[in-house]
Amino acid sequence: MTDRNLEFPDGFDEFAQWEVQSKGFFEHAVVRSGDVAVPVTFFDPDRLRQEVLSETHAGRAFSVKRLLVVPKVTVEQMRTAVAEAPAELLEDGGLGMTSRTSISLSNDHWLVLFDLIAMLNAAEGLVWEDQAEQRALWDLEATLESVLPDVVARDYGDRLTNARDRLRDATADRNDAGGS
């Protein structure tokens, strides 16, 4: 069996561990095996039940890719779940693809793109030509969320504003979307 490492974001200290266990849910972990890294989400049974009921009572489907349910969301139980998870968790990065493309951009670019993708994924009434487009954005958001420490930082809003300020064209202002 291939070695699997469970990685946590920077700043995942004792307080963050207590907070995760209290919430019964954690979505910022990455399982790495060799050159494959996949984001995973952990729920305890009570929190999972709450989320499923909340979404379905609102008439929405509940879906979480690479979900692992543990008795309590602790580092020890998350590591055990990863060690015992089926091999499919890591096959082809969990994405069913045989090749990959890498794009190198600054952290500012990725942070601004992450926020845009999250807004698109949260938008209601968005019409997709094909559900694969929606799936691709969900996967991209989850991947970025797992590798960008800024998105889970307490001062995320300030970091996003600063990234936007650094990226904006010199002739544009904060309210200029460029197309109007």
Image: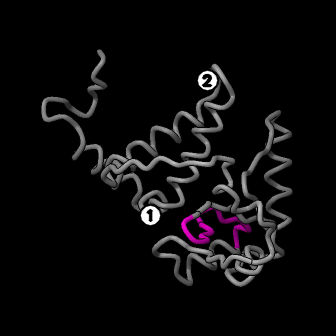
Quick check: 100 left or right of 174? right
The residue range painted magenta reads: 22-35
- Report the front residue among 58 and 89: 89
Q: Is residue 54 above or below residue 37?
A: above
Q: Residue at x 57, y 74 (%)?
A: 7
- Report the front residue among 27 and 88: 88
Q: Amino acid at mark 2?
A: Leu
Q: Is residue 103 above or below residue 30?
A: above
> Residue 129: x percent and y percent?
63, 19
Q: Residue at x 13, y 35 (%)?
A: 170
Residue annotated with mark 2? 126
As helix, strand or loop, the secondary structure at mark 1 comes to: helix
| Label annotation for residue 149 | 1
Quick check: 53 left or right of 9? right
Q: How many marks overall?
A: 2
Quick check: 92 left or right of 85? left
Image quarter where the N terminus lies is: bottom right
